[in-house]
Amino acid sequence: LTALLWLRRDLRRGDHPALLAARDAGGDEGIAVLFVVDPGLWERGGPVRRAWLTASLEAAKEDFDGRLVIRHGDPAKVVPQVAAEIEAGSVHVTREVTPAGQRRDKKVQEALEDKEIDWVETGTPYAVGPGLVRNGSGDPYKVYTPFHRAWHDHGWPEPAAYPRSLDLVEVDSHQKALDMLDKAFREDDLPTMPEAGEKAALQRWRDFRDEALDDYDGDRDKPAIDGTSRLSAYLKIGAIHPRTILADLADKRSQGAQTFEQEIAWREFYADVLFQNPRSAWEDLRDALPGMDYDEPDDAIEAWKDGRTGFPVVDAGMRQLREVGWMHNRVRMITASFLTKDLHVWWPTGARWFLDRLVDGDIASNNHGWQWVAGTGTDASPYFRVFNPITQGEKFDPTGDYVRRWVPELRHLSGKSAHQPWNHDDGYAEGYPERIVDHAEERKEALSRYESARR
Ligand code: FAD
């Protein structure tokens, strides 16, 4: 019997335990490698994620010698059907841990059971599978720092070997699926995306490791500098596994390397939080603010999405997001704080927009990142933390370069002055919009709402 590998968030050939398991199961009969375009997910994903997925699939196809099978439809029907076509004895996957992914997999597994085909899960998209890091009483961690310590102590396996030769069975793709992918590249308003695929991911990691890792600790909070790895979109789609990165970090002692490992651990922490609290995807994780009063100011939300709030660093971030499908972490925090605390909007509105526009859009990291800022997430008492968008901009972008790069209407202002156009006679000469709110007033308003919600 052959074996079928069904790819989802693991679009790569190297360091892929489920692929090795499939290869061993298929033996001389060989394996087929399948991706299913699930119409429901495809629609919900939005144009940016569709385009990034498509680019990543094109690259994966090359990695699998042109023999990646792409089908369209409900996976509970398509996966058993392809498995039957190739006479597979087993279907292999990397275990999915998100609530929606687990629900889907259960249905597929049941459909396979009816046909007496085995379902085999090997590994997860994380170094340590969500649910495995527990405290002394066997409970999951609710706070990052002790999680990180226990996660590190738990450890992870070495990267899996690269399968040089694979016996890949030839199977037809669905023309409909190929047409859908083709269309994904032609949608309007797509950002400029990085090169997709496993080779690009490994190259990016090596370049960052050799050139920027040691300075990461000092540079990671400066949005004007290319000081972070930009690996998030590759990690999201599984073009690289975090284990590959962690293995390289093991012998590095610099502060930069240590801090970088901690950031990888944030990704693992949020996946664990979502695994333990499936409802926290779209609801407040902690019921910290019962009865909190939120607004839905349509015009202001549109101004925020378009980068026209009149607050330079907020607008720079929102335009960076629109243009390249990525935003610097510091600026994600500032723009999220602006929406939730200056405009008093409930965090899911912002989380939805980010997921629609980010190439790295990930429900665990994004939605818990939003909750962290909003004061409903894993941080214990952050409701009083209201970022000042002006001082944050001046502190983390002291040269003003980040703002000028993304906001052309402020390019005539030199240095730090790009952060305060209102202090310059010609500040608005190039058409930059006036501030849509008074930060000092909205800060007071946010704090008073938070105080009454907590009571
Ligand atoms: P680096 O600084 O090079 O970090 C390396 C890797 O560590 C990242 O690729 C990422 O996988 C992980 N990482 C770093 N910081 C975090 C963090 N705070 N939380 C979780 N993982 C982290 N990250 C996403 O991958 N997808 C998202 O949809 C996402 N949405 C976010 C929304 C908000 C409001 C906030 C505050 C943060 C969000 N993050 C998200 C986390 C972080 O901003 C990005 O991971 C990071 O900016 C990606 O750039 P990088 O790869 O250059 O990061």
Image (cartoon, helix red, strand yellow):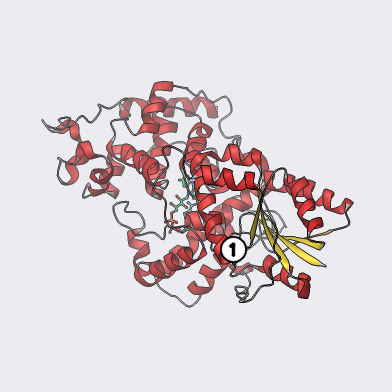
Q: Quadrant of the C terminus?
A: top right
Q: Quadrant of residue 393?
A: top left
Q: Position of residue 429 (x, y in %)?
A: 14, 30
Q: Dot 1, how many residues are within 10 Å of its Cα: few (below 14), some (14-19), or many (20+)?
A: few
Q: Secondary structure at mark 1?
A: loop
Seen in the picture, residue 279 relative to 62 is either above or below; the reply is above
Q: Is mark 1 within 8 Å of ligand 1?
A: no
Tell me the residue that label 1 is attached to.
66
Residue 146 in picture, x, y percent from top left: 57, 58
* For residue 308, above or below residue 387: above
Q: Residue at x 51, y 68 (%)?
A: 245
Q: Nearer the viewer, residue 80 or 217?
A: 80
Residue at the spot 73% in from the left edge and 47% down from the top edge: 75
Is 4 placed above or below 411 here? below
In the picture, measured across the screen, residue 107 lies left or right of residue 371, that is: right
Query: Is 409 displayed left or right of 245 in the figure?
Result: left
